[in-house]
Amino acid sequence: MTTPWTEQGMRQNGYRECSGSMHALLKDLGFAEHARRGPPYVRFWYPAAVVAMASERYLVWFGPEADRATVDRRDATLRAIAADPELEAALYAVWVSYGTSNADAAHAVFMYLMEALPELFGCLLPPGARGLRG
């Protein structure tokens, strides 16, 4: 068993390290208190679900083009997560339930966000749709 404050332990516990620029972005969006300092101690670790949603790789999920509206939607989503500890905890639980399947976990987290924050994602739903379960 790994200890939780080793690099392997942090990953197994659902955290990911992030770059300095991503740390600055997340800090600006309200996640300043959410970072964990981990090994080596100059790195910043955030819940993996948050890092995935903040990454450029998944920006396309927030809109059809990487335009200002898409970036604003992503940033508003991250602000909503930072402001709601229960939502962040739920996303963390969704992420860790997928184990090592990062792509599946990221997709599940995004689907959860679409359901939890319909005011931000209604424009991405087909006409007449009421949400994922609707």
Image (cartoon, rainbow, N blue to C red):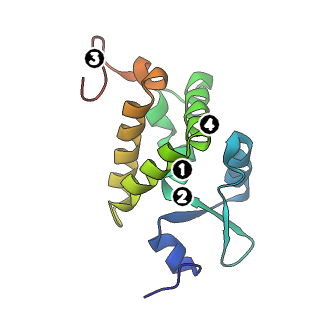
Q: Position of residue 102 (x, y in %)?
A: 39, 58
Q: Is residue 57 visible?
A: no
The quadrant in which residue 69 appears is top right
Q: Residues within 10 Å of mark 4 (few under 14, many from 20)?
A: some
Q: Secondary structure at mark 4?
A: helix
| Label at residue 50 | 1
Q: Secondary structure at mark 3?
A: loop
Q: Looking at the rendering, in which quadrant would you find the C terminus?
A: top left
Specify the farthest residue to the top: 128
The quadrant in which residue 117 appears is top left
- Circles 2 and 4: CB atoms closer than 8 Å: no
32 in relation to 15, above or below: above
Look at label 4 and name its amino acid.
Answer: Arg
Look at label 3 and name its amino acid.
Answer: Ala
Q: Which residue is mark 4?
A: 79
Specify the farthest residue to the left: 133
Q: Which residue is mark 3?
A: 129
Q: Which comes before the other along the chain, label 2 or label 4?
A: 2
- Circles 2 and 1: CB atoms closer than 8 Å: yes
Along the line of sight, which residue is nearer the eye, 127 or 86?
86
- Tally the numbered discs: 4
Look at label 2 and name its amino acid.
Answer: Pro
Q: Which residue is mark 2?
A: 47
With 15 as the anchor, is 91 left or right in this view? left
Q: CA distance from mark 3 to mark 4?
A: 25 Å
Specify the farthest residue to the bottom: 1
With 49 as the anchor, is 30 left or right in this view? right
